[in-house]
Image (spheres, rainbow, N blue to C red):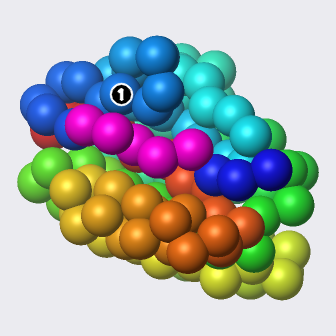
Amino acid sequence: MSSPEISSLSWGTMKVGAQVYKDCKVWPGGSRTWDWRETGTNHHPGVQPADLEEVVKKGVKTLVIGRVMTESLQVPAATLAYIKAQGIDAVVLQTEKAVKEYNSLASKGANVGGVFHSTC
């Protein structure tokens, strides 16, 4: 299965296939909304391992994390250590750059997943 393209990104909206999200998780063969309330995520302390477990379980080799438009979403060292311990490469970028990197990897057939927030 291939990783789906994020076909558009604007403030508050991301499109993956026919689905439209504010925040999303993507992986080979699928996507869904990323609801921060599920894990209590906030800008500080930021992305937690629990936010990533679903994508990690899909067997990705690279995980792209979008730090929001203003880069105010933190990615703690413990979260990066969790990703590394799973044998996964992490790419952490501002959301617009993260989406471009994710799409580039996906278009090359890479086994890539990601989590992206489209505001802030």
Give, as a single range, the part of the protein colored magenta: 4-8
- Image quadrant for the C terminus? top left
Q: What crowding class fits label 1: few (fewer than 14 Cα within 10 Å), some (14-19), or many (20 or more)?
A: some
- The foreground one among 43 and 102 is 102
- Give the overall secondary structure of the magenta segment: strand
**In the visual, does 84 lie left or right of 112?**
right
Which x, y percent locates residue 67? 31, 57
Residue found at x 26% / y 55%: 95
Residue 72 position by quadrant? bottom left
**Three-letter amino acid code of the residue under disc 1:** Lys
Residue 113 position by quadrant? bottom right
Which x, y percent locates residue 80? 61, 75
Residue 88 appears in the picture as rendered: yes
Which x, y percent locates residue 17? 48, 27
The answer to whether 59 is drawn above or below residue 27 in the figure is below
Residue found at x 14% / y 34%: 10
Residue 45 appears in the picture as rendered: no
SS assignment at label 1: strand
Residue found at x 65% / y 82%: 89
**In the visual, does 74 lie left or right of 18?**
left
Circle 1 sits on which residue? 15
Which x, y percent locates residue 37? 54, 19
Residue found at x 57% / y 44%: 4
The answer to whether 99 is drawn above or below residue 4 in the figure is below
The answer to whether 20 is drawn above or below residue 85 in the figure is above
- The foreground one among 50 and 65 is 65
**In the visual, does 34 lie left or right of 113?**
left
The answer to whether 96 is drawn above or below residue 97 in the figure is above
- Examine the structure image and report whether residue 80 is included in the region drawn in magenta: no
- The foreground one among 88 and 5 is 5
